[in-house]
Amino acid sequence: MTKRSACHRVATLAGVTTPPAPTIQPAAGRLGVLTVGLGAVSSTLIAGVELARRGQASPIGSLTQMATIRLGKRTENRTPLIRDFVPLAPLDDVVFGAWDPFPDDAYVAAQRAGVLESGRHLEGISDALRDVRPMRAAFDRTYVKRLDGENTIGSIDKRAMLEAIREDINRFREEKQVDRVVMLWAASTEIFIEPGPAHESLEQFEKAIDANDPTIAPSMLYAYAAILEGVPFANGAPNLTVDIPALQDLAVERGVPISGKDFKTGQTLIKTVLGPMLKARMLGLSGWYSTNILGNRDGEVLDDPENFKSKEVTKLGVLDTICQPDEYPELYGNIDHVVRINYYPPRGDNKEGWDNIDIFGWMGYPMQIKVDFLCRDSILAAPLVVDLALFFDLAARAGEKGVQEWLSFYFKSPQTADPVLPPEHDIFIQQTKLKNTLREWMGENPVTHSEVG
């Protein structure tokens, strides 16, 4: 949650006069949604939005399109749809653009991804999908060794990459005649990069770009370009990207909302549900073994140990934050937490997440929970991208800037505006923060679930 929202919430709960809700500019005109990556997730997203606005499919999984929000006391029976409560951009006003190292348009990309049935969901909207042709990507195989596409701007220096991305953003604005733009990273996971001196300040970051420093990854250049052009940026992969002081400070200075990292879709979604349950009941946890079988392009990239390291870090951090082992060492002080991802091409985008959870209860007696989540990776991710695009646009029109903690609900490894504070991983607390932020922005009281009625 933003600092202003947090202060507003505390003041409300304390019963004192609260500051006025922010003035939210209307969602006038067209909203450009730029995705870095036009693979399974982005092509599924674009197809789903096209079908939804034609009334041919339901945007299931999207809070902005399907969820309601309670206002006031339970007895008031006020539960409008979120999209009717806050001034979100309608899907009819969304225009898509993308970058990708492969030249496939959204129609070909969707066919190759194999997520959606061609005759049922792609052929009828083929013209709209073919109209989304990827711009040449600022791509470097150093960071994603398993991919080798020809639709790139080539092996040029990092400064030239940055300027090319900025030119693409402005050309997209002009050609598509959009009034506002948001950008989301929906591309492959980059190799693991440790935060270092190059990331500490904008001055050091700029020098590192000119020196072609290897700790400046392409995702950082996309994020930097977005912030410089006043475009909100969301990071859907575990890359370091905007999780560095240089870009976080610049986003605050420029008044641009940012957030990340790594879309929370399958196995980690399960952990943020079951973890709070164990802690709420004070049940002990001795081990959690997670393995994934995935056969899409993401699985191929993550088959490289350097790229998997980035994903592993975001997946492993969840339980420690939820269970608070320092506060409950007897219950959670010695958890064996193991995460594996296995590339298995026959499975395609239909990922299987298998979890073996060893817990213990009264007097230490052991028990087990086993979860086998046969999910569809892009089907779970697409509605998250819709929500983030619309919520980031809303945040920008509300004058928000910097890290948007209220959108932690959507990420495996949420960022915090204050680096000293740990992120919130409990999905139920995250949902409460998200909805209370919307309530406050619209001049409604937050819901604490302590009121009568």
Image (tube, rainbow, N blue to C red):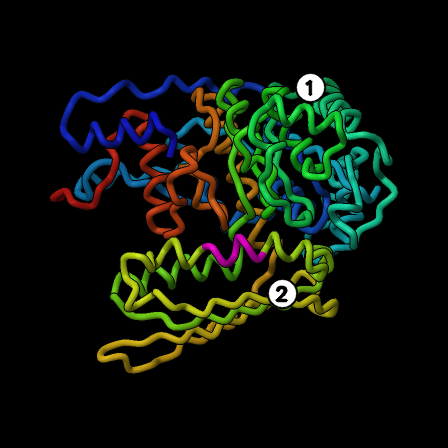
The reply to whether the magenta stretch includes residue 80 is no
Density class for disc 2 (Cα within 10 Å; few <14, some 14-19, many ≥20) is: some
Q: Which residues are magenta?
A: 312-317
Disc 1 marks a residue whose amino acid type is: Gln
Of the residues under marks 2 and 1, which one precedes in the sequence? 1
Asked if residue 193 is positioned above or below residue 2 in the image, the reply reads: below
Residue that appears at 47% across and 55% down: 317
Q: Residue furthest left?
A: 452
Q: Position of residue 254 (x, y in %)?
A: 53, 18
Q: Nearer the viewer, residue 174 or 116?
A: 174
The quadrant the C terminus occupies is top left
Q: Position of residue 325 (x, y in %)?
A: 33, 60
Decide if residue 289 is on the left or right side of residue 202. Answer: left
Is residue 52 in view from this perspective?
Answer: no
Residue 183: quadrant of the picture: top right
Residue that appears at 73% across and 46% down: 143
Is residue 55 in view from this perspective?
Answer: yes
Q: Residue furthest front?
A: 197
Residue pointed to by mark 2: 341
Q: Secondary structure at mark 1?
A: loop
Q: Nearer the viewer, mark 2 or mark 1?
A: 2
Residue pointed to by mark 1: 177
Q: Position of residue 30 (x, y in %)?
A: 60, 23
Decide if residue 213 is on the left or right side of residue 67. Answer: right
Asked if residue 148 is positioned above or below residue 203 in the image, the reply reads: below
Disc 2 marks a residue whose amino acid type is: Ile
Tag of residue 379 = none
Residue that appears at 84% across and 31% down: 156
Residue 335: quadrant of the picture: bottom left
Q: Position of residue 337 (x, y in %)?
A: 47, 67
The reply to whether the magenta stretch includes residue 313 is yes
The quadrant the N terminus occupies is top left
